[in-house]
Image: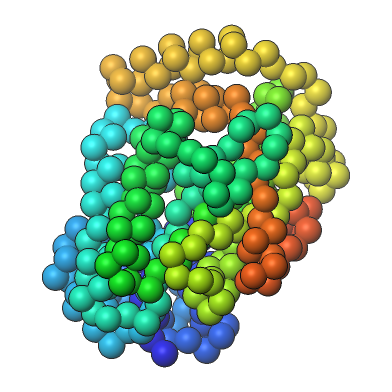
Amino acid sequence: MKTFVTGSTGFIGSTITRELLKDGREVRVLVRPGSDTSNLSGLDVEFWKGDLLDRETLRQGLKGCDVLYHAAADYRLWTRTPDEMYRVNVGGTESILEASIESGLDRVVYTSSVGTLGNSGDGTPGKEDTPVSLADMVGPYKKSKYLAERVAEKFVSRGLPLVVVNPSTPVGPRDIKPTPTGKIIVDFLKRKMPAYLDTGLNIIAVEDCARGHILAEQKGRVGEKYILGNSNLTLHHIFGLLEELTGIPSPRVKLPYLPILAAAYINDGLSRITGREPLIPLAGVQMASKFMYFDSSKSVQELGLPQTPVKDALRLAVDWFRSNGYA
């Protein structure tokens, strides 16, 4: 069985690729010219040069493949050009799924995000069917992923055998950018976290998240959504676990939300003038106003989603960041 993977050079995508190879799968990966392929170094994969918006290249790349994992996305909390993010996340999803339906694939797994799901923000975990609308989305990344998920649903109605997975916040090795959560860990290791906001996240080991994708392909119901998550933890609790792992003191000062939000608005305005990424991303601060807790019981029960202890996942992340010169 040959499997096509987009986003394979990234954090989640490269881990999906590794898990597929462990299962003995033949893997072809979509790689943009000039991409950093260090996450795929030494792996026995077939490289397919192309772009998500080049539909003919995608058609050719999908020839001979049975399954698609569409994990590619433009994931940033700030961008000076939101249209580019929509072009990749929404337009790119449209292109690859159009090519998929023409290719007659047996199964498609689309990587969305828990950010597209409903969440009260008060600590009550969101579920796959919690009500939500575009108006609830904060920032261009969440909005673009929400719209891309609607594109995926449209293709299901056209007969594409597609399953949606909604990863929460994965942590672990090979977070090369790093992701916003990875940057929090790196800043902690560099002792650049003197204080914290009163917020919370759902954390999952990146290997479990990748395995959840494969389980969704094998056991997921077409047209259904599956949250790939594990533990709901406050940011303060996460720092406490990092303190246990590293001996670095956890921040003890809790920051008031409104002054940080005001600073984020000022940073955002300056960034729009200078073009430089803000030190305090506005979308990130706005998201932090909610406890982003989610219920992954559907995935555990229907798919058998693994639940590696979060402390173990954080340990692997810390070891990887340290051994690769991030901190």
Residue 230: x and y in percent read: 70, 55
Q: Quadrant of residue 125?
A: top right
- Which residue is rendered at x = 59% and y = 68% of the image? 212
Residue 47: x and y in percent read: 32, 76
Going by the image, does 321 lie left or right of 76?
right
Q: Is residue 61 above or below residue 181?
A: below
Q: Is residue 42 above or below residue 209?
A: below
Quadrant for the N terminus in the image: bottom left
Quadrant for the C terminus in the image: top right
Going by the image, does 257 lie left or right of 264?
right
Q: Is residue 93 above or below residue 3?
A: above
Q: Quadrant of residue 291?
A: top right
Q: Quadrant of residue 312?
A: bottom right
Residue 215: x and y in percent read: 57, 74
Going by the image, does 239 lie left or right of 128?
right
Q: Which one is in front, 146 or 11?
A: 146
Residue 300: x and y in percent read: 69, 65
Q: Is residue 134 visible?
A: yes
- Which residue is rendered at x = 59% and y = 9% of the image? 259
Q: Which one is in front, 7 or 306?
A: 306
Q: Is residue 321 visible?
A: no
Q: Which colour style is shown?
A: rainbow
